[in-house]
Amino acid sequence: MDLDRVDMVTLTEDNIESEHICCAFSSKKNVEGYQLKKAWLAERLVEGFVFRKFDVRGKVFIEYVPAEYAWRPIDAPGYTCIQCFWVAGRFKGHGLGARLLQSCIEDAQAQGKHGVVVVTGRRKKHWMTDKRFFEKYGFEVCDTAPRDFELLVKRFDDNEDAPQPRFRESAKRATYEPVDAARRLVFLYTHQCPFTIHYVDEMMAAAEARGIASEKIELTTREAVQNGPSPFGVFGVFYDGEFLTHELMTQNKFGKYLLNKLGSCGRSPDRATAGTVRRPARASLPRFIEMILRQVIG
């Protein structure tokens, strides 16, 4: 296939049923999440949501929307917000990402927007496009949030009246007060990402293996996400009310993550629910770690 000649396809009400949506389309374990994402996407089209991809069998796409309708905890009236951007594997290095980004910029300019914004990380983060890619095309940091999240903007003009894009205060606090205090680990998720359904269940299984009560809460409206505590918006994990991570993980990986991170969340992991392995008085530290790993990952 000549990738220099491949066409772009923009999803519409007429073709959304017949076109694949790139992410998770070939994964059997994410079939439910894929269908939920398609339904979620179909409801967003009327709001000006754009899903544009290259006509290939792979993950090469961009999603963007007027920032007022973005499922991100930001204030950026008059801007376009990129919500997801993915060029995978063998499709990298052919200029496809640049073409997708340019199409977004041109749409925003045609609509008279002040510019384009995107949430990313100070360092490379899982499930997010590296900020260095955006910086090559004139994006710059305009605000920050906990855990090294950054809001980038590409402005189209020097209009002094144009508002400065910002994270909302809820994202800057990055805390969540659980309804049930006994459930110390909380997963907030949406159907914007087709992978959340599967991986949330895997991560909850890892928590259960460690004796930590948890719950998952679906955010069903953009208002809930815009006023939510996760800087990432579409997914967030909280322990004792404090933001842990935005990363979707397998059961095995999250079990190891809990082992490494729980002690740095501001409260002692000794308060975890019954079932947590405690270090015997005479057990060496390496032996203790081995005992915990056996419980978490089997």
Image (tube, helix red, strand yellow):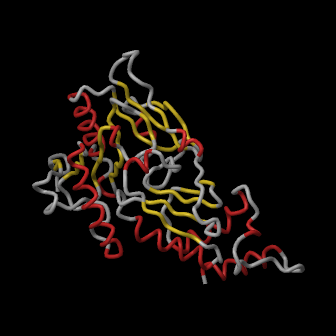
Work out whether residue 104 or residue 179 is closer to the camera in this orientation and state it.
179
> Looking at the image, which residue sits at the far bottom?
298
**Residue 207 sits in which quadrant?**
bottom right
Residue 162: image x %, image y %? 38, 21
> Looking at the image, which residue sits at the far right?
282
* Quarter placement of the N terminus: bottom left
Residue 6: image x %, image y %? 16, 50
Work out whether residue 143 or residue 52 is closer to the camera in this orientation and state it.
143
Instruction: Kindly identify the residue that appears in the image at 30 percent across and 43 percent down.
Output: 64
Instruction: Kindly identify the residue that appears in the image at 27 percent across and 67 percent down.
Output: 35
Relative to 167, is 90 on the left or the right?
A: left
Count of numbered circles on the image: 0
Work out whether residue 274 or residue 155 is closer to the camera in this orientation and state it.
274
Instruction: Kindly identify the residue that appears in the image at 35 percent across and 39 percent down.
Output: 81
* Quarter placement of the C terminus: bottom right
Residue 164: image x %, image y %? 45, 26
For residue 228, above or below residue 23: above
> Looking at the image, which residue sits at the far left?
14
For residue 103, above or below residue 3: above
Instruction: Kindly identify the residue that appears in the image at 47 percent across and 45 percent down.
Output: 227
Residue 44: image x %, image y %? 25, 50
Relative to 212, is 158 on the left or the right?
A: left
